[in-house]
Image (cartoon, helix red, strand yellow):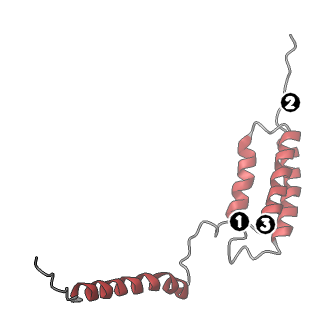
Amino acid sequence: MAVKVVPPCDHHMFDSNVDNCLSEFNSSMETNSYQDRCPWPTVKRIYNKLKLCVDNWANLSWCRGHRFLVDKVFLDVHETYFSLCGQVHDPPLHTLIMLIAPVIIVTLLMTLLCSYLTNWNIEMPEQPQL
């Protein structure tokens, strides 16, 4: 029974080639206004290309089992480019008004309609007695 020996992770090979992947990604990100707003999903294609590149070099450099190396690359990318993506912003005032106004109007109209119907006097004709 032959024992297969896996070579150790070549950190230098991984780091130098991932730097090339990141260089291409950084150049592509220069065209997006990631400092002002979340660039996702417009950069999804180049992000997936970066992921494939990093995963490929993790395999080729025998660092696939050292997942923390790949995770560190993407944590740095997310910290740099996607830090605004998790922030929730309130919608503009006119959008809020458009959402809330119909509910208020319907509530007021229902109150008036109920009031009108309860005060409406219908005269019932007298029933003839037998």
Query: What amino acid is found at the position of numbered circle 1 in the picture?
Result: Thr
Q: In which quarter of the image is the N terminus?
A: top right
Disc 3 versus disc 1: distance between alpha carbons? 14 Å
Whole-angstrom CA distance, mark 1 to mark 2, is: 33 Å
Point out which mark residue 80 bears. 1
Residue 12 seen in this snapshot? no
Q: Please give the name of the residue rendered at 23% of the width and 84% of the height, measured from the top-left corner.
A: 118
Mark 2, other Cα within 10 Å: few <14 / some 14–19 / many ≥20: few
The numbered mark, 1 or 2, whose residue comes first in the sequence reads 2
Please state the horizontal and vertical placement of residue 126, each as a whole percent of the image: 15, 85
Dot 2 amino acid type = Pro
The answer to which of 12 and 124 lies nearer the viewer is 124
User: Which sits in the foreground, 1 or 93?
Assistant: 93
Please tell me which residue is depicted at 50% across the width and 81% down the height of the picture: 99
Q: Where is residue 12 in the image (x, y as percent from the top left)?
A: 86, 45
The 10 Å Cα crowd at callout 1, few under 14, some 14 to 19, many 20 or more, is few
Indicate which disc, 3 or 2, sits on the residue closer to the N terminus: 2
Task: List the residue tagged with mark 3.
Answer: 43
Mark 2 residue element: loop
Residue shown at the point (73%, 70%) measured from the top left: 39
Of 103 and 9, the residue lying toward us: 103
* Vertical comparison of 99 with 34: above or below: below
Please state which amino acid type lies under the numbered disc 3.
Answer: Val
Q: Quadrant of residue 40?
A: bottom right
For residue 7, the mark is 2
Give residue 113's position: percent from left, percent from top: 32, 86
> Disc 3 or disc 2, which is closer to the eye?
3
Q: Is mark 3 on a helix, strand or loop?
A: loop
Quarter of the rendering occupied by the C terminus: bottom left
Q: Position of residue 98 (x, y in %)?
A: 52, 85
- Left or right: 73 in relation to 27: left
